[in-house]
Image (cartoon, rainbow, N blue to C red):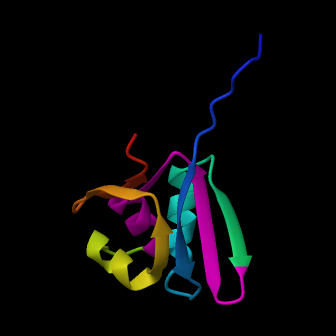
Amino acid sequence: MTEQTTSTRDVGVVIQESESNRPVVEAIEQDNPDCSVLHTPGLIRITAPGRLVITQETVEEKLGREWETHEFQMAIVSYFGNIQEWDEDEIVIAWDH
């Protein structure tokens, strides 16, 4: 009998590396402890197994100012997964299964 393993597909975002985006990346890392962060010249790729959450509250704590989730559009270069939720409190990227 063969044992089957199910793997969770990664989701993620690629964010333009900049001083203003650094707190956003830190917030994503805090809210997604299982995420992986890869720095390449000019870009930061953040991946997580199955689900990635960006919360307004955590980003505001890191930025030290108010932040609206629509500002995230200016930071991202691309994403993989489906945007399941995007409202004023949080953004959720996950695969629809």
| Quadrant placement of the C terminus | top left
The answer to if 61 sits in the magenta stretch is yes
Q: Is residue 81 left or right of residue 44?
A: left
The answer to if 52 sits in the magenta stretch is yes
Residue at point 64% right, 89% down? Answer: 42
Q: Is residue 69 left or right of residue 76?
A: left
Q: Which residue is most to the top?
A: 1
Q: Which residue is most to the right?
A: 1
* Residue 7 percent location from the top left of the image: 63, 37
The quarter of the displayed image where residue 87 is located: bottom left
Image: magenta residue range: 40-63
| Quadrant placement of the N terminus | top right
* Residue 71 percent location from the top left of the image: 32, 79
Q: Which residue is most to the left?
A: 88
Q: Is residue 28 left or right of residue 87?
A: right
58 shown above or below 2: below
Residue at point 51% right, 62% down? Answer: 27
* Residue 43 percent location from the top left of the image: 62, 83
